[in-house]
Amino acid sequence: MAIWKNEFKGKGQVFASVEAVRRRMWRYAIANRFEYKYVRNCQQRIAVKCKVDACPFYICVRGKVKMDGMYVKKFVGQHAHSVGDECMWGSGEGEG
C-alpha cells in the first residue's frame, strides 16, 4: 500500500485511460487515508475533492485532444485537516 501514496504526483502527469485514473484515485485515497467525492466524473474530465468541507484538496484530470489518455490539469495535494481523523470509512470506492 505504501506505493499507492504516490499514485498522483502533480500537474502534467499522464494516464492511459479514464478507468486508470479512477482506479488510481481509489488506491491513492486508501493509502493516504482520506475520503473523496467526484465533482465531475465522465470520459472527458474527472474532478475530485476531499469530502471534508473547506478542504482545499482537488485533482482535475482531462482527456487529451486528438490523443488517447488523460492528464492532470490541476493538482492541489494538501489537506486542511489531519488526514484520516475527520473521514469516515466504509462508503465504497470513494463515490458514496
Image: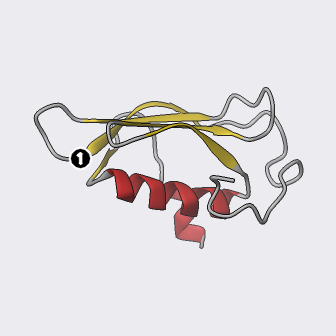
Residue for point 67% across, 64% down:
92
Q: Give the residue at mark 1.
A: 69
Residue 45 lies, in percent from the top left, at 39, 35
> Image quarter for residue 89?
bottom right
Q: Judge whether residue 74 can be spotted in this image.
A: yes
What residue appears at the point 63 percent right and 56 percent down from the top-left corner? Answer: 29
Depth check, front residue: 66 or 14? 66
Q: Is residue 5 visible?
A: no
Secondary structure of the residue carrying tag 1 is loop
- The residue drawn where x is 63% and y is 52% is 95
Q: Residue furthest bottom?
A: 1
Q: How many residues crowd mark 1 within 10 Å: few (<14), some (14–19), many (20+)?
A: some
Q: Is residue 5 above or below residue 68?
A: below
Q: Residue furthest left?
A: 66
Q: Is residue 48 left or right of residue 21?
A: right
Residue 14 position, x and y percent, is 30, 45
Q: Where is 73 relative to 91, above or below?
A: above
State which quarter of the image contains the N terminus.
Answer: bottom right
68 to the left or right of 63: left
The structure residue drawn at horizontal position 73% and vertical position 58%, both measured from the top left corner, is: 33
Q: Is residue 8 left or right of residue 95?
A: left
